[in-house]
Image: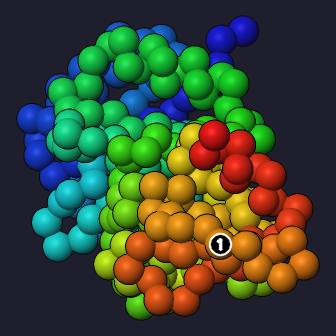
Amino acid sequence: MQTKYRAIVVDDERLARLKLIRTLSKFDSIDVVGEAYDVPSAKSIIDKVAPDIIFLDIQMPKLSGFDLIEQTTIEGRVVFVTAFDNFALRAFDVNALDYLVKPVQEERIEKLLEKLSKDTPHNCASNKLNYDDKIFVSDNKFMKFIAIRDITSIHSIGNYSKIHLKDNENILVYKSLKEWELKLPVNKFCRIHRTTIVNIDHIEKIEKWFNYSYRVYINKVENPIMMSKRYSGIIRNRFS
């Protein structure tokens, strides 16, 4: 028996909502049970119908799609719908199921349904980010997009991790180093210590240190990062 997914569409543009609803109506496995034009109306519909899928626009007046996620308990899966077509948007912190670029094509909905049928927490964690992606991160002070290529290193701090960017900005997020390791592109990011991942594109030099350890110098960062003997062979293979 085919699974039937109850969906809502959230977008401030009426024509965009209608166009997406028309596209979704072509799929027997999707039943659009509501639509909303802003965050308050979306919260009301979510509370009433508890949808399985929320097709959510990112940029809306006053409050964004991310604000909706911050303010609402959502049991269903989030599919971001965006007008940005020059890079992939990845909402790492909110574990979005997919990211659709307007206008949404039927082929993308087919792929979405295929992904949804295979979706498990393990598969979600193993979806790799691309080097040209931008991801959405948040801490207790702000929410912002950052480019994967701008990350120079990530350091573990208990259940949190501190992201260092090339402009020397630091962001503390609630993500373990293991989660980052599963997500980041392996051809660019390498673990050099049990507490540290580095972007090899930002490495300036590596020098030998005591007890078969090494010091890794990052561009425009004064203090080097220690690399343990255990991981030194891995990064040498990357450079070779």
Please tell me which residue lies in front, 50 or 97. Answer: 97
Q: Depth check: 20 or 223 in front?
A: 223
For this view, does 170 lie left or right of residue 2?
A: left
Residue positioned 81% across, 59% down in the render: 231
Q: Is residue 136 toward the left or the right of residue 232 in the image?
A: left
- The amino acid type found where label 1 is placed reads Glu
The residue nearer to you, when weighing 224 against 15, is: 224
Q: Is 232 displayed left or right of 51 in the figure?
A: right
Which residue is at the front of the view, 82 or 39? 82
Corner quadrant of residue 41: bottom left
User: How many marks can you see?
Assistant: 1
Q: Which residue is mark 1?
A: 207
Q: Position of residue 138 (x, y in %)?
A: 46, 75
Q: Is residue 233 above or below residue 31?
A: below
**Residue depicted at x 47% and y 67%:** 204
Q: Quadrant of residue 196?
A: bottom right
Q: In the picture shown, does residue 144 fall above or below 120? A: below
**Which color scheme is applied?**
rainbow
Q: Position of residue 52 (x, y in %)?
A: 56, 40
195 relative position to 155: left or right: right
Q: Quadrant of the C terminus?
A: top right
Label 1, secondary structure: give it. strand
Residue 19 seen in the current view: yes
Task: Locate residue 74, reporting x and y percent.
Answer: 55, 58
14 vs 114: above or below: below
The image quadrant that residue 105 belongs to is top left
Which residue does the image show at 38% across and 19% down from the upper left? 108
Category of crowding for the residue at label 1, using alpha-carbon neighbours closer than 10 angstroms: few (below 14), some (14–19), many (at least 20): few
- Residue positioned 86% across, 71% down in the render: 212
Residue 38 appears at what percent x and percent y?
23, 60
On the rendered image, what quadrant is the N terminus found in? top right
Is residue 177 at least partly visible in the picture? no
